[in-house]
């Protein structure tokens, strides 16, 4: 029964509520709904149908009433609470419906604040409710389309439940994907990337479009950005926004993508899966209901996602999503060119980065798809996208071939296909296809024989096509797939060597001659000769198969070569290497007897012979002839026999236009001569000699070739094979001798060379001993020769005399010596070498003496090649050269000096080889004498000569002897002297001399024993470290060159200054003989530099071999090497770098190991008197300091800065530049060491304790502007970076910065200030300008930074320094700066300043008082004002009283201004404090407003305005105190004080009127006393004050004392009798005011007689009261009389 009663009561209440609701006006409906609606909805929890029906009626009524009235708000908060607390589903459903309705009616601010609350617990709600709430939140986010408030953003950030964030992000992403449907769309459609269900979820009842949709998306982006979620979570949202149709959304999305999501991990599996699902959707999955199937993303978004996938390795390994994605892009519905392009790009990425497991699954499928795509394309399509797609397809195939070669290795179809494509595709795409073809090559590595055969044919075909790309790939495949021993591929390289394209030629040559084997010459030992070249027979057979004409014999006059010349050259070079390799590998007997090898040699000769065809190039002929000579050097008998029968073919090339070809053919002819019969050889010699005889004026080439051939043929005949008559040989020699003198220089040189070749085989002095030319006894075979000779020489007697033994030798030497003076360098070289060859075979003393004299005549030659040749000749004379006559005559040998490169090659001493000549006792003695002569010439004349060119010659010759004859016993004995000589030559200025000396040191080290090596290392180390002394001194003569010409300028007349004589002359002319010693000191210094440079060159070579011998010297050597690597001299720098590279395997480790030694040496040398030492030390330090830690450099840090600052002020510009570099390095190091975020706090504090005090004391206070600037900037950076570590240094830092404000100011401003007023600039304005400039300076910026780090402990040290600076600081900027710093300091530390207020006030108050600058005065006053705020009551009272006293005490204008400024500042900064002292402040301020000084009065006027809201009210409030002060001041002896008091009384009277009545008697008492008596300047104001009081308080005056007005009238009347005109006029004027004020008629009787008397006096001229207003027209009460 109780439940029924309760139910009835509920229904009755609902009925009453419905009735009340119906009767409520719309204007009051909102308030009623606030109570009724939540209750009504909560009643739905009742299961009674009647109750629910009543509620539904009520809700229906509410809906109808509020539907069209959006201004009526619903109780959304109460509804939300009801929703959260309700258990009934029905209540929840209706609550959320009305929440949605209520939310639309909220104000924007309410929406913004309420929306985040709806997300709490969202994940626990039913799905439909989640959608509604998310739509509500999204609607609220529209309000944030421009920006989001931080408070609101904080609410969103509190949503930290993963499920709720996931729901919000998902909804936001779907909203971002949503695009409004087009106007012609019928039915329900969904946007790309969404399902129909999701579209309904986003839109609700009404579709979103236009600005509403873009605003919502922008709001979503701003809110999500403010939530600071992980980049991986927001990446899909931002990338979707970046392709939106609205530009504003796209722009915002791009910005967030770059700024917030750029760091997203694209290898995150969840992110990539999410992006793949976004790309593909679920439209293809039939198991999902149609309305829930998600469509694929839009093409624009898909293309954007593809670019993401192409940067993610994880995306390449998500099979099968990866596969679907690729096929969708290439073959999917709705795909476009852009997607196809992206799909192919992703395919390449997949092939490159997919794991092998994934690739095995996807590779074949994707490859088949690509091939299908290519088959469907037309190769000639002109569409850009189509071409690029094809290119990407081929690129993908290339990538797949690299990763999965097994897919291609089984057949050549893919290779054929790609090579064909390379020839067919558009030229613009060929580079991509070419890259794919090159990539495919690796797939065919190690393929089977059948595939290899197919590839060989394919490559050979494509190596000769028109398209250069195909030829390139063919050669590339040949070099990649096959080794050097593969004949078909090497033949393809030979074809490529003649290609028109440079890159193809280079690749082909690399395939034939790999770079790693370039340095392996054919003369190397068998262990070094490469063995991976093909057998000679195989490669020759392949070539002959390709060109069968190779097997045919070359005929005389053959015109065309069988192959292109460049191809032929490369082919010959390759075959020569194969031949050399085969010869080295075969034993000597096998090589000679093997039929197969012999056949190969014959075939090689045939190929070389065909290369000599007439139309072949010069290079081809030279290469082929050298090849034939090389074959002959290995098989002399075989070649001699072959060409003995083909002499005409061989001789046709003696007249070849190329000298190298003629030389090679001549040697071949000499070798061939050994197989000729005696008669054939004799005929050959006769024919050759007849070709170049004197009267035969044939072609030069023919003559030259004949001369060369004669030398080689005669030298061969002298061996006895073949045996030719001595007479013929002697005659041939005579013809050659005659040719030397009679023919042109080139032929004469060739003849001398030929004689040298003859001399290698025997003694030339044996010729001509008993030989006489007689016509009757001349052999028939000599007639052609003697005929020519007789025609040249007039008589046989002359000939006979010249051909005697001594005469012959002398004539020969003299003729050859004449050629040494030729300008033709090559001729001179040939003659010089000929001297050596002749002396090699003929050791007669006289011959060697004459030859040596001729060679020594070249000692002053400046031609390097001549010197090298002469050195070689001396080696032949010395004996024991490392060559034999056969090597010289029967191989491609040229000369020792050219085959061993002095300047760039590594010279190794040759193996000692005994001379081929059997030495008898006489021969040995002659050799010994020749060696002694050479030694004496070198060591006594050349090496220590005072002429630099002779020293250069000596260095070259000594090096030649040491190199080529190093193992000779005599050379071994001379090693100490040689070492000393080379050491001496290291100091030479001439680079060649120095280079020879340094290389000579290396050779000596190789040749010497352990003791010699140790001494040499010690000497070089001493030289480099500067402790060595030169043992032998070069004696100066007057012509000795001390300096290089032009190195120290010229004399005034333009004469050069270089020799000792010229320097002495200059010193004498200048009257300073001692100047010569300075010149010599400078020269010695230059020599020491050269000495170090030369020693470095030699040391770099020795260091490689010295090894452990150098370890004891490293502590001394390493610091020097480090410094010398930065020497200004390029040569020294390069030399030291060579040593460094040779010695130090790990330079970084070495520097770390010897760091202390290095830095100490550098710091020491930075103060050297030598500028190059200072410069190199600074540069080395700047590099050495990079990246160092405090424990390494801490103890050197101050010295580093001292060095840097000293260098920055150096006298030499280059040192200053090096100092700047060191300063930058030290700055970077110091900042890093002092930065607590980069260095441990303890180290940072220690570094700061070193650097900062130094900067403050030595840097900023320096007189060098650049040092000051650097120091200030560094200190400022310290303040920024050091953090709290700077606190211990704040007192000194602040003090220094404040002082620097003035000390570092431009001093020109002081001068400008002195003259500012003269040009119309006010001083105060100029001061403000200076202060403004200082405020923008780095010093003030540093002070601002310092303020941030001040704490109470720091104040204890800082305040005394500030006090000191206030007392003693000079300069406007410093004084203003310290005052302002104190002001800012007080603001920052607040109440922590209390303990220091007394000490600060004690110095600040006097500063305000005595400061003359108004700007400084105001600054100090401002500091006092800041302190007043935190002062105690006693302190505050004293400060205020002292400030007032500055005005009230007797003082000047400055103290009064100070008082006004202080009081004004106090009022502004500590108004609350000053308010308590208004009773003592305002009276004085009020009186001071009337001071005579306009500046003072205006300042106090400002103070009054600061402290008074209304003047009358303020005056009434503090009237007693003001009157008391005015009365006291009236009693002052100062007339100015009386005057301003009177003015103040006037103001009181005018402002207060009758309110002044209580104090009128006191004021009149003092005024009346002042009226009589002495008249002082401005006393008129007393009368004015009296009149003003009478006018204002006339009733009070009359009431207090009836006779008072009479007294006042009488008193003022008496003043009218004063003689001072202005005072008298004032008295009359004020008398009128008083009479008018009181208005008593009886005053007429009092003043009328006086006035009449005055008028009478005036008319008589005795008294002039001009200006009196007491006339008939303005007599006031007297006007009626």
Image (cartoon, rainbow, N blue to C red):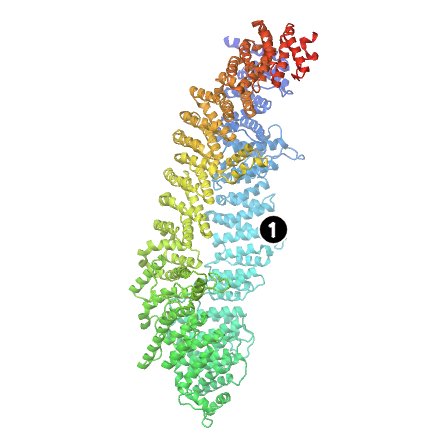
Depicted 672 relative to depicted 171: above or below = below
Residue 961 lies in quadrant: bottom left
- Residue 1312, quarter of picture: top right
Give the camera-side residue of 534 and 140.
140
Q: Position of residue 1106 (x, y in %)?
A: 33, 60
Mark 1 closeness class: few <14, some 14–19, many ≥20 residues within 10 Å: some
Residue 781 visible from this viewpoint: yes
Q: In this view, does 173 lie above or below 395?
A: above
Give the vertical position of 914 relative to 765 (above or below): above
- Tell me the SS state at disc 1: helix
Q: Which of 889 and 173 is in front in this view?
A: 889
The spot of residue 811 in percent (x, y) is: 43, 83
Considering every residue shown, the one lying at the far left of the view is 1011
Q: The C terminus appears in which quarter of the rendering? A: top right
- How many marks are shown on the rendered structure? 1
Instruction: Pinpoint residue 1644: horizontal percent, then vertical percent.
Output: 65, 7
Task: Give the percent coordinates (x, y) of residue 231.
Answer: 50, 37
- Left or right, 869 with respect to 260, comes to left
Residue 1346 is left or right of residue 1571, and the answer is left
- Identify residue for label 1: 386
Q: Would residue 194 be visible to someone looking at this image?
A: no
Tell me if residue 711 comes above or below residue 208 in the rendering: below
């Amino acid at each position: 029964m109780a439940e029924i009663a309760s139910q009835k009561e509920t229904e009755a209440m609902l009925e009453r509520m419905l009735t009340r609701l119906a009767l409520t006006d719309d204007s009051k409906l909102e308030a009623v709904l606030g109570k009724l609606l939540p209750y009504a909805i909560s009643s739905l929890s009742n299961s009674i149908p009647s109750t629910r029906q009543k509620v539904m009626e009520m809700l229906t009524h509410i809906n109808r009433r509020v539907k069209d009235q959006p201004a009526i708000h619903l109780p959304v908060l109460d509804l939300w609470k009801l929703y959260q607390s309700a258990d009934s589903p029905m209540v929840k459903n209706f609550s959320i419906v009305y929440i949605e309705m209520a939310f639309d009616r909220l104000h924007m601010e309410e929406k913004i604040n309420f929306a985040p609350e709806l997300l709490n617990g969202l994940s626990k709600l039913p799905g439909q409710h989640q959608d509604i709430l998310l739509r509500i939140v999204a609607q609220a986010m529209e309000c944030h389309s421009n920006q989001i408030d931080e408070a609101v953003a904080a609410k969103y950030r509190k949503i930290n439940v993963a499920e709720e964030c996931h729901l919000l992000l998902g909804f936001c992403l779907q909203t971002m994907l949503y695009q409004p449907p087009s106007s012609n769309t019928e039915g329900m459609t969904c946007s790309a990337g969404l399902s129909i269900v999701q579209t309904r979820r986003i839109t609700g009842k009404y579709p979103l479009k236009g600005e509403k949709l873009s605003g919502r998306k922008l709001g979503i982006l701003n809110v999500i950005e403010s939530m600071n979620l992980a980049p991986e979570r927001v990446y899909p949202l931002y990338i979707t926004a970046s392709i939106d149709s609205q530009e504003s959304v796209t722009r915002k999305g791009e910005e967030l993508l770059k700024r917030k999501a750029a760091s997203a991990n694209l290898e995150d599996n969840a992110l990539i899966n999410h992006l793949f699902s976004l790309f593909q959707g679920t439209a293809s999955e039939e198991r999902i209901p149609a309305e829930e199937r998600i469509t694929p993303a839009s093409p624009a978004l898909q293309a954007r996602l593809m670019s993401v996938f192409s940067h993610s390795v994880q995306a390449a390994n998500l099979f099968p999503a990866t596969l679907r994605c690729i096929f969708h892009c290439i073959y999917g519905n709705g795909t476009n060119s852009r997607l196809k392009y992206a799909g192919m790009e992703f395919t390449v990425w997949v092939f490159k980065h997919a794991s092998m497991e994934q690739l095995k699954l996807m590779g074949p499928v994707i490859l088949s798809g690509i091939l299908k795509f290519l088959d469907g394309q037309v190769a000639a399509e002109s569409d850009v996208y189509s071409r690029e797609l094809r290119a990407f397809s081929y690129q993908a195939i290339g990538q797949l071939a690299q990763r999965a070669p097994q897919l291609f290795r089984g057949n050549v179809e893919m290779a054929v296909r790609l090579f064909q494509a390379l020839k067919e595709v558009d030229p613009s795409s060929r580079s991509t296809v070419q890259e794919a073809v090159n990539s495919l090559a690796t797939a065919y590595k190690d393929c089977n024989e059948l595939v290899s055969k197919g590839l060989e044919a394919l490559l050979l075909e494509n190596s000769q096509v028109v398209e250069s790309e195909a030829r390139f790939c063919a050669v590339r495949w040949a070099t990649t797939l096959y080794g050097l021993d593969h004949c078909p591929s090497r033949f393809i390289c030979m074809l490529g060597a003649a290609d028109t394209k440079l890159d193809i030629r280079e690749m082909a040559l690399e395939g034939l001659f790999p770079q790693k084997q370039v340095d392996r010459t054919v003369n190397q030992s068998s262990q070094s000769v490469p063995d991976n070249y093909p057998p000679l027979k195989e490669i020759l057979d392949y070539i002959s198969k390709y060109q069968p004409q190779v097997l045919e014999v070359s005929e005389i006059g053959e015109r065309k070569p069988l192959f292109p010349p460049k191809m032929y050259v490369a082919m010959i070079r390759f075959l020569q290497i194969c031949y050399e390799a085969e010869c080295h590998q075969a034993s000597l007997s096998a090589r000679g007897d093997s039929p197969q090898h012999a056949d190969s040699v014959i075939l090689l000769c045939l190929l070389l012979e065909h290369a000599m065809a007439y139309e072949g190039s010069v290079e081809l002929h030279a290469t082929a002839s050298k090849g034939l000579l090389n074959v002959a050097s290995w098989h002399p008998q075989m070649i001699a026999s072959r060409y003995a029968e083909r002499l005409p073919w061989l001789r046709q090339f003696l007249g070849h236009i190329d000298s190298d070809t003629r030389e090679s053919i001549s040697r071949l002819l000499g070798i061939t001569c050994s197989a000729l019969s005696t008669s054939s050889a004799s005929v050959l010699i006769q024919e050759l000699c007849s070709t170049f005889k004197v009267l035969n004026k044939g072609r030069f080439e023919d003559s030259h070739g004949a001369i060369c051939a004669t030398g080689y043929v005669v030298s061969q005949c002298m061996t006895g094979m073949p045996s030719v008559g001595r007479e013929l040989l002697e005659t041939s020699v005579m013809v050659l001798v005659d040719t030397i003198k009679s023919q042109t220089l080139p032929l004469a040189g060739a003849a001398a060379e030929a004689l040298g070749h003859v001399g290698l085989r025997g003694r030339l002095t044996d010729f001509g001993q008993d030989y006489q030319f007689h016509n009757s006894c001349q052999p028939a075979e000599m007639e052609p020769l003697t005929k020519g000779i007789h025609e040249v020489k007039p008589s046989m007697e002359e000939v006979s005399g010249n051909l005697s033994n001594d005469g012959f030798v002398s004539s020969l030497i003299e003729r050859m010596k004449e050629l040494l003076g030729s300008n033709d360098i090559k001729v001179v070289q040939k003659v010089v070498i000929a001297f050596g060859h002749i002396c090699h075979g003929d050791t007669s003393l006289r011959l060697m003496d004459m030859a040596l004299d001729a060679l020594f005549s070249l000692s002053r030659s400046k031609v390097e090649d001549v010197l090298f040749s002469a050195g070689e000749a001396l080696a032949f004379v010395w004996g024991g050269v490392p060559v034999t006559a056969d090597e010289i005559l029967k191989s491609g040998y040229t000369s020792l000096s050219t085959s061993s490169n002095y300047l760039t090659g590594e010279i190794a001493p040759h193996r000692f080889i005994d001379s081929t000549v059997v030495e008898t006792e006489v021969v040995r003695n002659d050799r010994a004498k020749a060696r002694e002569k050479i030694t004496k010439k070198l060591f006594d004349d050349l090496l220590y000569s005072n002429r630099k060119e002779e020293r250069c010659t000596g260095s070259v010759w000594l090096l030649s002897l040491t190199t080529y004859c190093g193992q000779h016993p005599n050379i071994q004995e001379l090693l100490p002297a040689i070492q000393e000589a080379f050491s001496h030559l290291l100091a030479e200025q001439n680079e060649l001399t120095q280079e020879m000396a340094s290389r000579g040191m290396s050779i000596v080290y190789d040749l010497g024993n352990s003791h010699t090596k140790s001494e040499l290392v010690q000497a070089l180390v001493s030289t480099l470290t500067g402790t060595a002394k030169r043992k032998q001194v070069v004696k100066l003569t007057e012509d000795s060159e001390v300096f290089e010409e032009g190195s120290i300028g010229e004399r005034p007349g333009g004469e050069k200054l270089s020799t000792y004589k010229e320097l002495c002359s200059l010193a004498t002319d200048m009257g300073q003989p001692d100047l010569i010693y300075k010149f010599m000191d400078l020269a010695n210094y230059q020599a020491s530099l050269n000495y170090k440079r030369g020693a470095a060159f030699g040391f770099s070579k020795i260091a490689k071999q010295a090894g452990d011998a150098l370890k004891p010297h490293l502590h001394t050597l390493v610091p020097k090497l480090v410094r010398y690597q930065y020497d200004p001299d390029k040569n020294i720098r390069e030399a030291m770098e060579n040593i460094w590279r040779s010695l130090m395997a790990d330079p970084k480790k070495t520097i770390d190991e010897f760091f202390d030694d290095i830095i100490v040496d550098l710091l020491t040398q930075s103060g050297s008197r030598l500028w190059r030492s200072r410069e190199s030390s600074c540069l080395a330090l700047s590099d050495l300091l990079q990246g160092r830690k405090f424990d390494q450099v801490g103890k050197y840090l101050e010295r580093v800065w001292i060095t840097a600052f000293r260098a920055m002020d150096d006298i030499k510009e280059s040192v200053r530049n090096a100092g700047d570099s060191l300063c930058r390095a030290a700055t970077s190091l110091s900042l890093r060491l002092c930065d607590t975020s980069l260095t441990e706090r303890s180290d940072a504090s220690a570094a700061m304790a070193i650097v900062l005090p130094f900067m403050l004391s030595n840097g900023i206070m320096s007189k060098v502007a650049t040092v000051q600037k650097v120091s200030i900037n560094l200190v400022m950076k310290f303040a920024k970076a050091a953090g709290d570590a700077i606190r211990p240094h704040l007192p000194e830092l602040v003090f220094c910065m404040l002082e620097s404000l003035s000390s570092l100011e431009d001093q020109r401003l002081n001068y400008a200030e002195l003259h500012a007023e003269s040009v119309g600039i006010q001083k105060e304005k100029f001061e403000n300008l200076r202060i403004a400039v200082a405020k923008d300076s780095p010093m003030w910026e540093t002070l601002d930074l310092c303020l941030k780090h001040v704490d109470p402990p720091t104040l204890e040290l800082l305040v005394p320094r500030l006090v000191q600076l206030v007392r003693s600081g000079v300069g406007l900027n410093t004084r203003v700066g310290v005052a302002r710093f104190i002001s800012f300091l007080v603001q920052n530390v607040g109440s922590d300043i209390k303990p220091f207020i007394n000490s600060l006030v004690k110095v600040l108050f006097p500063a305000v008082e005595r400061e003359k600058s108004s700007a400084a005065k105001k600054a100090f006053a401002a500091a006092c004002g800041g302190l007043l705020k935190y002062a105690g009551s006693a302190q505050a009272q004293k400060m205020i009283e002292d400030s007032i006293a500055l005005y009230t005490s007797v003082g000047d204008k400055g103290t009064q201004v100070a008082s006004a400024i202080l009081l004004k500042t106090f009022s502004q900064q500590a108004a609350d404090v000053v308010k308590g002292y208004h009773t003592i402040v305002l009276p004085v301020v009020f009186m001071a407003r009337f001071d005579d000084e306009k500046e003072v009065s205006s300042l106090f006027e400002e103070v009054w305005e600061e402290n008074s809201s209304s003047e009358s009210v303020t005056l009434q409030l503090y009237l007693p105190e003001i009157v008391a002060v005015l009365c006291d001041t009236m009693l002052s002896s100062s007339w100015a004080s009386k005057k301003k008091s009177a003015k103040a009384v006037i103001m009181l009277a005018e402002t207060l009127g009758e309110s002044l009545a209580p104090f009128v008697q006191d004021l009149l008492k003092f005024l009346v006393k002042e009226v009589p008596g002495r008249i002082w300047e401005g006393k008129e104001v007393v009368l004015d004050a009296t009149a003003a009081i009478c006018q204002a308080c006339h009733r009070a005056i009359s009431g207090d004392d009836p006779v008072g007005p009479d007294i006042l009238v009488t008193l003022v009347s008496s003043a009218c009798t004063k003689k001072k005109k202005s005072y008298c006029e004032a008295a009359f004027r004020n008398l009128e005011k008083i009479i008018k004020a009181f208005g008593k008629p009886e005053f007429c009787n009092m003043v009328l007689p006086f006035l009449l008397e005055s008028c009478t006096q005036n008319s008589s001229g005795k008294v002039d009261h001009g200006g009196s207003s007491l006339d008939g027209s303005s007599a006031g009460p007297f006007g009626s009389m």
